[in-house]
Amino acid sequence: MVVIVDTIANPLRPRHPEKVNRPDSASPPKPDWIRVRAPNTRGYADTRNIVRANGLHTVCEEAGCPNIGECWDKKHATFMIMGDTCTRACAFCNVKTGLPNALDVAEPQNVAEAVAKLGLAHVVITSVDRDDLADGGAQHFAETIRAIRAACPSTTIEILTPDFLRKEGALEIVVAAKPDVFNHNLETVPSRYLTVRPGARYFHSIRLLQRVKELDPTIFTKSGIMVGLGEERHEVLQVMDDLRSAEVDFLTIGQYLQPTRKHHAVMRYVPPDEFSSYEKVAYTKGFLMVSASPLTRSSHHAGEDFARLKAARAANAR
């Protein structure tokens, strides 16, 4: 049997339809400190097979994370729930955009089974934006958290959520499920939002993180930004102050990398010594945990960082 796909009358839908007609944006060549090895280990293959067998998506693949080889070799995967299609079109993101499919009611259990198979002591769950849903996917997050708790009681759970913009009561649903870490990324400084993250609102995101602490002070809060998008140093320092005013515990800062030429260009590759400087300043501002380096990503080394986060809180309580 032969299947013919008519790509002329019915062209295949592009991954980023909103970016197709944009002019190419050239980025400077990558410096040596940003390069990583291609994934080709047995551990990587085992993790990939478990993800495929359970019909799951990971942000590691969908967002083109440069650390996928290292993390998957250790059987650390960040699961992306609610499908692989996002309702927003951020200028930095490689996740597919468009109208998503209906939620998979079996997904929370499938994620829990994958966590058990991988033997994860700490798991990170993220999602696409689902502005099409009345609660933005909050209930699905809660069901996934509870399924993991039931299948793997000792596994600690970190979630990386959308902003639930204009979804009244959504945040309360997620917090009630009691994740160990609630992460919501600011992504960039306020002055870059209109070009980098146009569907979001900076101060709404700050308030979201603040509200988590008001609802449940025992939950660790976390946020991150990318640098190299045209921000100024003083703007990064102001973001730190805004996050501390919301009592955020953990800050991550990493280098933005351009997924395709249709995405926002890299304006500058920030050298490692500047990341070290940001880390030192962030600790002086009161963060319990800071990760700042060219290859830092929200869920990179999440398990080890969570252990350090708990130890820092315990030390401060003495």
Image (cartoon, rainbow, N blue to C red):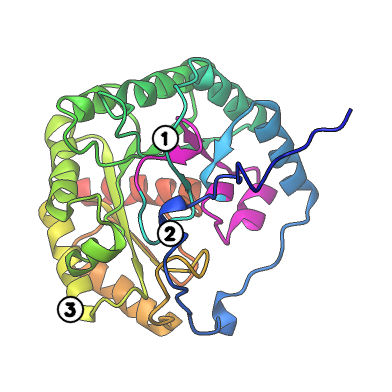
For the residues bearing labels 3 and 2, Cβ distance under 8 angstroms: no
> Three-letter amino acid code at disc 3?
His
Left or right: 139 with respect to 146? Answer: left
| Range drawn in magenta | 61-88
The CA distance from mark 1 to mark 3 is 38 Å
Mark toward the viewer: 3 or 2: 2
The CA distance from mark 2 to mark 1 is 15 Å
Left or right: 243 with respect to 64? Answer: left
Q: Residue at x 13, y 38 (%)?
A: 211
> Three-letter amino acid code at disc 2?
Lys
Mark toward the viewer: 1 or 3: 1
Q: Quadrant of residue 125?
A: top left
> Three-letter amino acid code at disc 1?
Leu
Mark number displayed over residue 234: 3
Please identify the quadrant where the N terminus is shown.
top right
Mark number displayed over residue 19: 2
The x and y percentages for residue 70 are 64, 57
Q: Secondary structure at mark 3?
A: helix
Mark number displayed over residue 99: 1
The CA distance from mark 3 to mark 2 is 31 Å
Q: Residue at x 13, y 59 (%)?
A: 242
**Residue 318 makes an appearance in the image:** no
Of label 2 and label 1, which has the lower sequence position?
2
Along the viewing direction, whichever of 61 and 156 lies nearer the viewer? 61
Q: Residue at x 48, y 49 (%)?
A: 95
Label 2 crowd (10 A; few <14 / some 14-19 / many >=20): some
Q: Residue at x 51, y 46 (%)?
A: 59
